[in-house]
Image: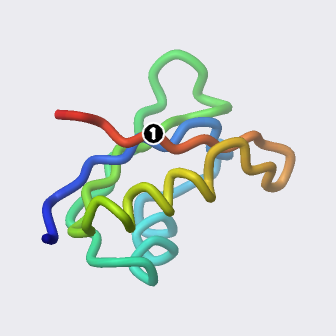
Amino acid sequence: MWKLKKILFSGLPADVTEMALHESLQKLGPVHSVLIIADGDPSSPAAIVEMSIDDEQAHKLTSRVTDYWHNGHMINARLLLH
């Protein structure tokens, strides 16, 4: 069953945009919202992304992205429970 999942992405590059994340993740499932969080360390922001995907898709996405080295940044993804 498809439910709205919130996924936290951390370790993103400083120049990441909500639009770029939305376009990138839209290939994996419907993206409802993207919120960039630059509090703390603006050189390595985080993002909360809400997507309509099922549990299996959420697990696959977070497993693939966790500890993913991209353009000098270690990116991680965690499924938020709330």
| Residue 65 drawn at (x, y percent) | 62, 54
Q: How many marks?
A: 1
Q: Is residue 34 left or right of residue 20?
A: left
The quadrant where residue 23 appears: bottom left
Can you say whether 67 is above or below 51 in the image? above
Q: Residues within 10 Å of mark 1 (few under 14, many from 20)?
A: some
Can you say whether 47 is above or below 5 in the image? above
Instruction: Pick the residue in front: 51 or 59.
Output: 59
Can you say whether 50 is above or below 38 in the image? below
Can you say whether 51 is above or below 5 in the image? below
The chosen color scheme is rainbow
Q: Is residue 69 left or right of residue 64?
A: right
Secondary element at tag 1:
strand
Instruction: Pick the residue in front: 17 or 75.
Output: 75
Q: Residue at x 26, y 68 (%)?
A: 53
Query: If the image is split into quadrants, where does the C terminus sit?
Result: top left
Q: Residue furthest top?
A: 40
Instruction: Pick the residue in front: 39 or 31.
Output: 31
| Residue 45 drawn at (x, y percent) | 55, 35
Q: Residue furthest bottom?
A: 27
Q: Which residue is mark 1?
A: 78
| Residue 35 drawn at (x, y percent) | 32, 47
Q: Is residue 62 left or right of residue 58?
A: right
Q: Residue at x 71, y 42 (%)?
A: 67
Q: Which amino acid type is marked by label 1? A: Arg
The quadrant where residue 37 appears: top left
Q: Residue at x 20, y 66 (%)?
A: 32
| Residue 9 drawn at (x, y percent) | 50, 43
Query: If the image is split into quadrants, where does the N terminus sit?
Result: bottom left
The quadrant where residue 64 appears: bottom right
Q: Residue at x 49, y 61 (%)?
A: 61
